[in-house]
Image (cartoon, rainbow, N blue to C red):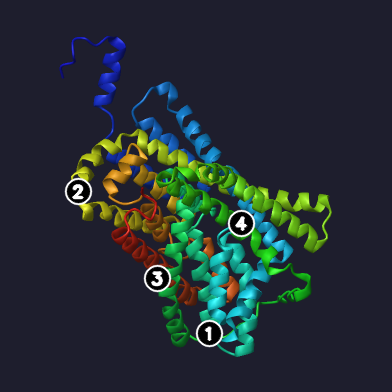
Amino acid sequence: MLLPASLNISEIRTYRFQQTMVSPVLVLLFGIGLVILLIVVVRLNAFLSLMLAAFAVSLLAPGDWGEKISRVTAAFGTTAGNIGVMIALAAVIGKCLMESGSADRIVRTCLRVLGERRAPIALMASGFVLSIPVFFDTVFYLLVPLARSFSRMMRSGYVLSILAIGAGAALTHTLVPPTPGPLAVAGLLGVDVGHMILMGILVGVPAAVLVFPFLNVFEKLCPLPVRPYPGEQETPPRPDQELPPFWLASAPVILPVILISANTILKVLAKQNPQLGPATLVASIMGDPSLALFLAAIVAMGTTVWSRRLSLTELGRMTEEALMSAGMIILITSAGGAFGAMLRQTGISENVGHFVESQSQAGGLLLLVIGFLVAAVMKTAQGSSTVAMLTTAGIMGSLFKTPEALVQYLHCHPVYLALSIGAGSLVFCWMNDSGFWVVARMSVWNETEALKLWTVTAALAGVAGFLVTFLFAWLLPGAFFTG
């Protein structure tokens, strides 16, 4: 092989190394396979698996050998800096909602407004709302006793109530920040958090409506009874007068959504009306996701202190427990960000960009299908929706050098790709997913019953979420935010 005559010794070595580099596509496949192998076969912790894969991919990617390890940790730090505060605050809010009785008040109000006949709809709505700041497992633990009490009273509807809770909670768990998965996907794809919240809710509501009729069918096909927990007594509910009022209970959930959404909307309107500049400035401060969640956390902690008559020491102990649980989520999420950044270092964007650039509108929308399917495969392989979202967003983001290039190739707002990935992470929920066992054990279902009922329901929720996302992307490619 002839080398350019103008190269010095160091450049010749670099040139020869680059000529023998592993294909970016092979490195991409190797990285994906390594993550699946470590999590599924070796049973290594997701954080360690993603970091090890990030180091391996970085070593195989082009670049200065002296920076191949340090750039992994730098990418880890960047991701943690972008989302770590929000995840920690969301964990505090969720803990306070549970301890103060605010979550219980929200559920009881929904049941009272919709009536006992529509209790499954109320339970789905409660799961949908509570799973925005609270993790899926926690929401399910909270709402299952209500479903059991309702079903005993009505002597029917247990399967419908359980699946309604799961479907509602799962949709916002994978579509709406500040839940870690969609929050990290938004960051990896360059999507504004406010955009992700608004579109996640707009997609999640009709998706829940589409799924609900199927849940009625499952209730008729498999009407399981309310079985007792083996050797356990259920905790009696707190008296209604001990719970905070609804307006205060719902404030930690509604406040950040309003502040962040107002910031997003005013930014768009200010482009067309410069007179909104002062209001936009105030909204940009108050609507910053970190500050908005911090204010919500203060409200949530104040409500807990007032409702439970806690001392400051007890409040500190409670928030410390919440932050400790958030620590692992932050580590896994940041490791996923580092893994995605290293995939971009392989140069895969140059290989794929020429193909995607020539595609039509349908070709751009095809990326939504690819994102959905890749997330579904990752979910099926290793079980965690969050890891599936992180890995898939890293893969899809690595195909493009910048968020602007992603928009150019997609021919629609990148929020739709983020939502497609979130929807795909609901397919296929089975034995390797902790959520599967939470649903099965808390519902007192055996593995076969859980597979027939919950696995199919989660898949239907994911497909419904994707179909609604695809329809929005086709009819409203700008997602209300262009201009």
Amino acid on which disc 1 is placed: Leu
The answer to whether mark 4 and mark 2 are in CB contact below 8 A is no
In the rendered image, residue 30, in percent from the top left (x then y), is placed at 34, 42
Query: Which badge, 3 or 1, comes first in the chain's sequence?
Result: 1
SS of the residue under disc 2: loop
Query: Marks 1 and 4: which is nearer the front?
Result: 4
x and y, in percent, of residue 350 in the image: 26, 36
Cα distance between the residues tagged 1 and 2: 50 Å
Viewer-nearest of discs 1 and 2: 2
The amino acid at mark 4 is Leu
Residue at (45, 83) in percent of width and height: 216
- Residue at 75% x, 69% y is 243
Q: Earlier in the sequence, mark 1 or mark 2?
A: 1
Residue highlighted by disc 3:
460
Sequence-wise, which precedes: disc 4 or disc 2? 4
Residue 324, percent from left and from top: 67, 48
Is residue 256 visible to the viewer in this orientation of the structure?
Answer: yes
In the image as oriented, which residue stretches furthest toward the front?
275
Q: Secondary structure at mark 3?
A: helix
Q: Amino acid at mark 2?
A: Gln
User: Mark 1 sits on what residue?
Assistant: 224
Q: Is residue 20 left or right of residue 316?
A: left
Q: Is residue 209 left or right of residue 234?
A: left
Say if 363 sits above or below 222 in the image: above
Q: With respect to residue 280, does 386 lie above or below?
A: below
Lower position in the chain sequence, tag 3 or tag 2: 2
Q: Residue at x 36, y 49 (%)?
A: 482
> Closer to the N terminus: mark 4 or mark 3?
4
Disc 2: which residue = 359
